[in-house]
Amino acid sequence: MFAMFPARWGTLLSAALLAACSGGASDAPATIGQVELRWTPSRASGVHAAGGGYRVYWSTTPGFAPGDPGVQSLDVPWPGSGQTPATASLTLSSGNYYFKVVAYAATGGGIESAPSAEVALAVR
């Protein structure tokens, strides 16, 4: 089952703060940032087929594991038609965030790859 994601395979993840804007009450402004995440697509064919895709995990705690309490996720399924999803956009409030991405496939019971290296980003 794990042969789909060999140990040497890794997903490269980068994060970029695309835009930030202030809002809210004048005494307590809230800052919101649009974050765009990009990764190198997996070469595993099951990821780019019906039922496959990527899952982006993020936390405010460095060194988190995807199953830890408080970790949030966004599913980025394969859209079909030969397209390869390799980006995700999130809107986050101000703070420090840590991101990881995994690939998954419908075959093998939806098993996930090992998480990518963690990427840190400060939203201000």
Image: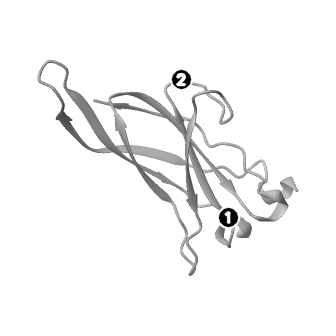
**Quarter the C terminus occupies:** top left
**Label 2 with label 1: CB-CB less than 8 Å:** no
Q: Amino acid at mark 2?
A: Thr
Q: CA distance from mark 2 to mark 1?
A: 28 Å
Residue at the location (73% across, 50% down)?
Answer: 112
Instruction: Give the residue at the far bottom of this rendering.
Output: 81
Q: Residue furthest right?
A: 1
Residue 120: where, in percent of width, then height? 46, 32
> Residue 33 — which label?
none
x then y, percent, for residue 83: 53, 74
Residue drawn at the location 52% of the way across and 47% of the way down: 13
The residue that label 1 is drawn on is 52
> What is the secondary structure assignment of the residue under circle 1?
loop
Q: How is the image coloured?
A: one colour
* Residue pointed to by mark 2: 61
Residue at the location (59% across, 68% down)?
A: 78
Q: Residue at the spot x=65%, y=36% of the render?
A: 66
Q: Please rate how many residues cluster around mark 2, counting C-alpha atoms within 10 Å: few if below 14, some from 14 to 19, many from 20.
A: some
First reached walking from the N terminus: tag 2 or tag 1: 1
Image location (x, y in percent) of residue 23: 17, 34
Measured as percent of width and height from the top left, residue 3 is found at: 85, 57
Q: Amino acid at mark 1?
A: Gly
Tell me if 21 is positioned left or right of 102 in this view.
Answer: left
Query: In screen coordinates, is 61 left or right of 53?
Result: left
Quadrant where the image shows the N terminus = bottom right
SS at mark 2?
A: loop
